Amino acid sequence: TWKNYEGVEETRTFEFTYDDNYNLLAGTEATSDGTIITYGANWEVLASKVSVADMTALTSDELASLPAPLKAAEGDTFAKVQDWGQGSKQTTYLDGAGNILGYHDTWSDEYGSGSSYMDADWNHLGGSNASADGSYASSSIRVKNSDGTETETGTNSWKEGETTMTSSYTFNFDANDNMTGGSEVRPDGTTVKLGADWSFLGEEISVTGLQSISQADFDLLPGSITGATAA
């Protein structure tokens, strides 16, 4: 038992079993915030649970912005917030049985703010950053698909004078974290197509709303830059 930096008393209880060489065989640990951690041999974390008895389930609006790994596969999802002070907080997401699904760290200071999502094993899932003056912002989310592949999507925005520029991207990765393809959309609407290992496949621009050139103008263009017809 001890007092933390805020003067609040905290308690940790534990029961560990070791072999003759003081190697951990199994054990449990309970912390002041109600977390119960179950260990296997060599300190492998087998389970980490928190009581949700006094918590209120997240609403559909609150769930909407969360990465899929932080939402319970069945039933309600709960959240426990720990305020670290000085603009920093950590939210732990739980299923109805108290199993930890993942975490969301947020912070802010005079320069800006940011956040980071992590799964139950602390693998990074994405996050966001924004400057205090509003001149720059970015966000990304990376999710694991049912076949073991992963997809990362994100946006970036910044100011050029009084104009806000925005770009976005979608990148795909295999189960070994090799990039398998994707695309980027630039502020001018150009879509850049990418192949495996970030190889460049080409660019395209939507012609929706654009006026086609006349046949006379088309006939003056070199064949290397024209389509089949003026339209």
Image (spheres, rainbow, N blue to C red):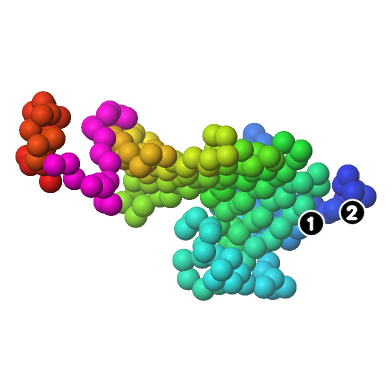
Q: Residues within 10 Å of mark 1 (few under 14, many from 20)?
A: few
Which residue has dot 2 on it? 9
In depth, the one of 8 and 230 nearer the eye is: 230
Q: Position of residue 206 (x, y in %)?
A: 27, 46
User: Residue at 62% across / 46% down in the picture?
Assistant: 115
Identity, as a three-letter code, of the amino acid under mark 2: Glu
- Residue 175 seen in render: no
Above or below residue 103? Residue 134 is: above
Which residue has dot 1 on it? 32
Q: Is residue 225 left or right of residue 20?
A: left
User: Total number of numbered labels?
Assistant: 2
User: Residue at 69% across / 61% down in the picture?
Assistant: 80
Question: What are the residue bounds of the magenta stretch?
Answer: 195-214
Q: Is residue 74 left or right of residue 176?
A: right
Above or below residue 224? Residue 65 is: below
Q: Position of residue 28 (x, y in %)?
A: 67, 53
Magenta span includes 39: no
- Pointer 1 or 2: first along the chain: 2
Q: CA distance from mark 1 to mark 2?
A: 9 Å
Above or below residue 35? Residue 25 is: above
Looking at the image, the residue that sits furthest to the front is: 216
- Tell me, yes or no, whether the two marked residues, 1 and 2, touch with CB atoms within 8 Å: yes
Magenta span includes 205: yes
Helix, strand or loop at mark 1: loop
Identity, as a three-letter code, of the amino acid under mark 1: Ser
In depth, the one of 160 and 119 nearer the eye is: 160
